Amino acid sequence: MTVMRGPRLAVDVGSVRVGLASCDPDGLIATPVDTLLRDTVRPGRGKLPTDLARIVIEVRQRGAAAVYVGLPRHLSGLEGASSASARGYAVALAQAVAPVEVWLVDERLSTVTAHQALHASGRSGRHHRQVIDQAAAVVILQAALDAERATGLRSGERVELAPGAPDLRRIAHDLHDGTEGRGDE
């Protein structure tokens, strides 16, 4: 599969916050978008968590060609609880943005790299918390874009939807159209 042109989004999933980054249609440079509070409350039936809903809206509005989700691994390459959480998030996101593909990419040291970049830009350490997640998303996306250019393929592991998985596209479509919550069927 040759990489198709179009904006891409990256998501840095944390237990408290979710960072978002995007790029230009040619995939040259990643830029920060936002930091979202992670919605850990299970929404009612037919609703997406607010952070996922916001990402779905960004995907639709930007016409994203793909979404990259950072997969935190230990330095050894093994996966832990954070990896399982990111994988679950990526599956829910893939269900909501289908047919846009979601890819898991290794994000080892992305937060460290983001902290270093913020420090090098003159931002004091105590102000990092406000933007570190979106800065980490920028690092994740830029690495994925660089890999795309080098190989001509999407980077990472494609998130496959299980047969019979709930179809969240209708909810996501209603969010984008502004009909969510009005009871339209």
Image: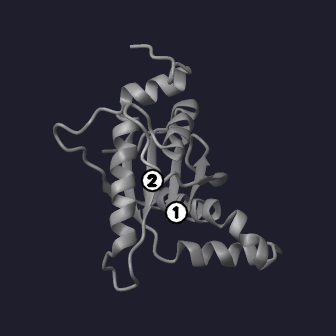
At 47% from the left and 56% from the top, the residue drawn is: 149
Name of the residue lying farthest toward the top? 185
> Could you tell me which quadrant the C terminus lies in?
top left
> Could you tell me which quadrant the N terminus lies in?
top left
At 53% from the left and 46% from the top, the residue drawn is: 51
Element type at marker 2? strand
Residue 111 visible somewhere in the drawing: yes
Q: Which residue is mark 2?
A: 68
Location of residue 157 (image quadrant): bottom left
Element type at marker 1? helix
118 to 25, vertically: above or below = below
**Gap between marks 2 and 1 measured at Cα:** 8 Å
Q: Residue 111 at x, y = what percent?
A: 57, 73
> Which three-letter amino acid code belongs to the residue tagged 1?
Ile
> Which three-letter amino acid code belongs to the residue tagged 2?
Tyr
Labelled disc at residue 17:
none
Residue 4 as seen in the image, left or right of residue 116: left
Name of the residue lying farthest toward the bottom? 76
148 and 14: which one is in front? Answer: 14
Location of residue 43 (image quadrant): top left
Name of the residue lying farthest toward the left? 163
User: For the residue carrying disc 2, how many other residues have a C-alpha within 10 Å: few (<14), some (14-19), or many (20+)?
Assistant: many
At 61% from the left and 43% from the top, the residue drawn is: 24
Q: Which residue is mark 1?
A: 140
